[in-house]
Amino acid sequence: MFGCLRKLGCLALILAAVAVWYIYTHGRSHTARKTTTAAAVWEPLTPNSAEAGRRSVESLSQRTGPVFANLTAAQAASYIFLVAAKQLPPSARHIETALIDDQLRVRAEVPLKDMGGPAALGPLASIIGDRDTVQLAGTIHVIKPGLGEFVVEGMKIGQASIPSVLIPRVVQHFRRSTVEGVSDRGLPMKMPEYISGVRIENGKITLY
């Protein structure tokens, strides 16, 4: 009997230890995610940020220059969407950007018709206003020398997350041209031929 109790006592200790480990590890990761999100700062896209981004990118072309360049979210997004890609509709207003969870995010107020309307959004169009905030989340991919794309991995319109299957339809309406090699989720962007890769990590964007 006492052996059984001893076994039960050991089992209880093991279960308690496992519970403490689970709460500690998952609680910390949850807190980290909350901290990352809370720490995110949304910044406007501006010509000054676009110019700073352009200078950082062009510095890589110099023989005695750096081998990589770090850009802020505002610099990268301003350079991409105001200079290199120019894919957001002219009707977009209040354009802002942030780096969240190793993704570049851009949000702007856009008319429903410029997001494809009911043809692209289906029943979701009925719960979206005539003009609402669209948020794009994604990464930058170098397709070949001189050509890259902003790959949209997530999208929200207002408070509604757009199903993955609908994202290519909306992206198609944002594109101003069709470029060979660009994925169905990608917004094409011209890139200097000396840019070989882009990494988004730890709150910064690094170009090589």
Image (cartoon, helix red, strand yellow):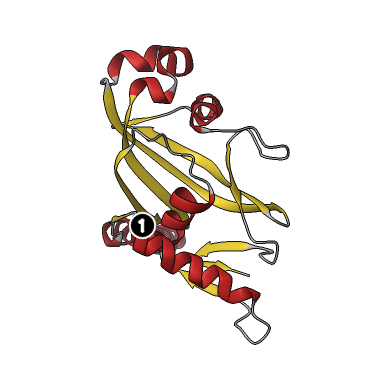
- The secondary element bearing badge 1 is classed as helix
Q: Nearer the viewer, residue 91 or 137?
A: 91
Q: Would you say 175 lies left or right of 64 here?
A: left
Q: Where 93 falls versus 142 (above or below)?
A: above
* Image location of residue 137, percent across then percent down: 45, 45
Q: Mark 1 is on which residue type?
A: Arg
Q: Give the residue at x 43% y 38%.
A: 88
* Circle 1 residue: 33
Q: Where 14 falls versus 95 (above or below)?
A: below
Q: Which of the 4 quarters of the picture holds residue 13? A: bottom left
- Quadrant of the snapshot with the N terminus: bottom left
Q: Give the residue at x 54% y 33%.
A: 176
Does residue 131 appear anywhere in the picture? yes
Does residue 203 appear anywhere in the picture? no
* Image location of residue 84, percent across then percent down: 53, 52
Q: Give the residue at x 67% y 37%.
A: 179
Q: Would you say 147 lies left or right of 16 here?
A: right
* Image location of residue 25, percent across then percent down: 40, 62
Q: Nearer the viewer, residue 16 or 183?
A: 183
